């Protein structure tokens, strides 16, 4: 429970939210603070009871300077209790609305509004629902924890999604280094007598990076490939992260918005890495102080997310978002900064790309601002997994160039 919660107004991919509260307002835990009428958007809620003390720009861990609502917590108030409600009577439309109202976004890092993913257009059908428990980035174990501690609740969340989508097959995909999670789910599925659940298949996947990417999971499980420039929906598939499914369960069964999550706090600067249940809007500093997390080395880099796809932060006053899976404290030795060298055309980046892109060509065309060529290279299909930059012997920050290329392509002509 942060004393001052910092809630960035936009924590999703899509149209930015506008504040619906003003400085001086008293707010309840779970109250909407910002929203947008646009289809691709997701509201944000207050994680605590308290008073709005400011609405101003702050450092957003992904976007840089961005508007946020600051709430001073009312320390005399206990956290809200969310009573369980009967969810059986809701139809698909009502269930989707509940997911929308709860502000649920992809919690594996994608932060795409979940209700949009569940709103399958007329005439289209999801045949295969895949629950993503792969968690392939090094260090991160928050999904592993939720899978072992909350399997029954996740199963109830899967039932909700299954009622919305009516898929023909459901898979829970877990990397084979998470034996406890596989065992827990196999037991939970066996115990369930519900028709839609007893058919679920728990799939143990090879442990490799980036196994948890949507397209990689679909290929590993169904053998089908999402064509370049297309979405999983185009081949009748939908992938949802386990944490997101748990949030759906809480939204539908308890009317609870997405105001807290489990994050991993790890890195070689910590003696005791761990997973913590934290309120969205707590800063990294709050979490370190509150839990007494001891740093044994001076961090060279603080990263939000995993070491491959995470983003380095300039300080620890940045808030945890709905999509923050972890915070890493890496020593200077682990977080070395290299000087970019000339590309030696070794094609190692091409070999490792899981979506068959040509990172070196994308880098070259980004440098020349060639928008047309970047479109032809399907730059938008890059999942920013970082494998190309990791392998590159010339230490070229390929993902940075790719992100620039994406921005160039996204700009209107
Ligand atoms: S891995 Fe690096 S050096 Fe090799 S082709 Fe790709 S960009 Fe060039
Ligand atoms: S980051 Fe590099 S390896 Fe990963 S998908 Fe993008 S281009 Fe391919």
Image (tube, grey):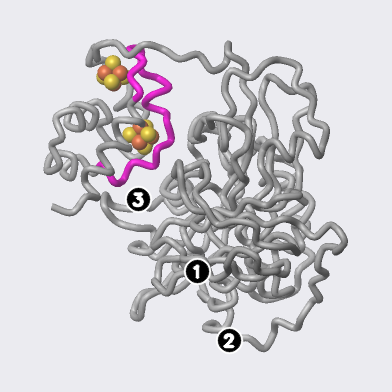
Confirm if mark 1 falls within 8 A of ligand 2: no
* Residue 123 spot, x, y in % from top left: 34, 80
* Residue 406 spot, x, y in % from top left: 27, 43
Whether 387 is among the magenta residues is yes
Confirm if mark 3 falls within 8 A of ligand 2: no
Q: Earlier in the sequence, mark 3 or mark 2?
A: 2
* Viewer-nearest of discs 3 and 2: 2
Q: What stretch is highlighted in magenta?
A: 379-397
Give the CA distance from mark 3 to mark 2. Answer: 32 Å
Marks 1 & 2, CB-CB < 8 Å contact = no
Q: Pointer 1: what residue?
A: 35
Give the CA distance from mark 1 to mark 2. Answer: 24 Å
Q: Element type at marker 1?
A: strand
Give the CA distance from mark 3 to mark 1. Answer: 35 Å
- Residue at 56% across, 49% down: 108
Residue 91 is marked as 2
Q: Element type at marker 3?
A: loop
Decide if residue 390 is in sight here.
yes
Q: In which quarter of the image is residue 327?
A: top right
- Residue at 46% across, 49% down: 66
Q: Label 3: few (<14), some or many (≥20) within 10 Å? A: some
Q: Earlier in the sequence, mark 3 or mark 1?
A: 1
Q: Earlier in the sequence, mark 1 or mark 2?
A: 1
Asked if 141 appears above or below 253 in the picture, the reply is above
Q: Pointer 3: what residue?
A: 225
- Residue at 39% across, 71% down: 38
């Amino acid at each position: 429970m942060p004393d001052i919660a910092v809630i960035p107004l936009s924590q999703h991919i899509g149209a930015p939210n506008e504040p619906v509260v003003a400085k001086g307002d008293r707010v309840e835990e779970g109250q909407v603070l910002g929203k947008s009428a646009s289809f691709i958007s997701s509201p944000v809620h207050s994680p605590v009871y308290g008073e709005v003390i400011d609405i101003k720009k702050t450092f957003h861990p992904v976007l840089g300077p961005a508007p946020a609502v600051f709430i001073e917590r009312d320390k005399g108030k206990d956290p809200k209790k969310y009573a369980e409600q009967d969810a059986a009577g809701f139809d698909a439309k009502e269930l989707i609305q509940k997911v929308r109202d709860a502000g649920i976004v992809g919690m594996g890092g994608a932060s795409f509004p979940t209700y949009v993913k569940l709103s399958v257009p007329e005439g289209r059908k999801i045949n295969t629902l895949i629950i993503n428990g792969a968690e392939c980035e090094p260090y991160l174990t928050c999904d592993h924890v939720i899978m072992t501690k909350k399997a029954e609740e996740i199963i109830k969340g899967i039932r909700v999604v299954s009622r919305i989508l009516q898929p023909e097959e459901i898979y829970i995909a877990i990397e084979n280094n998470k034996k406890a999670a596989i065992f827990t789910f196999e037991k939970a599925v066996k115990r369930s007598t519900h028709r839609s659940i007893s058919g679920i298949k728990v799939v143990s996947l090879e442990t490799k990076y980036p196994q948890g990417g949507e397209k990689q999971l679909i290929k590993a499980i169904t053998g089908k490939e999402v064509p370049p420039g297309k979405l999983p929906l185009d081949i009748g598939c939908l992938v949802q992260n386990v944490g997101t499914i748990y949030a759906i369960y809480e939204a539908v069964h308890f009317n609870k918005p997405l105001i807290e999550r489990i994050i991993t706090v790890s890195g070689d600067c910590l003696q005791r890495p761990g997973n913590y249940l934290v309120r969205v809007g707590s800063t990294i500093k709050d979490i370190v102080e509150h839990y007494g997390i001891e740093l044994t080395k001076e961090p060279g880099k603080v990263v939000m997310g995993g070491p491959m796809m995470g983003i380095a932060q300039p300080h620890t006053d940045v808030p945890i978002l709905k999509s923050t899976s972890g915070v890493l404290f890496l020593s200077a030795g682990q977080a070395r900064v290299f000087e970019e060298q000339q590309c030696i055309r070794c094609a190692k980046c091409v070999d490792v790309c899981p979506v068959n892109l040509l990172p070196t060509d994308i880098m070259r065309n980004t440098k020349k601002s060639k928008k047309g060529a970047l479109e032809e290279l399907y730059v938008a299909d890059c999942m920013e997994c970082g494998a190309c930059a990791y392998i590159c012997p010339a230490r070229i920050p390929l993902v940075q160039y790719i992100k620039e290329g994406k921005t160039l392509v996204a700009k209107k002509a």
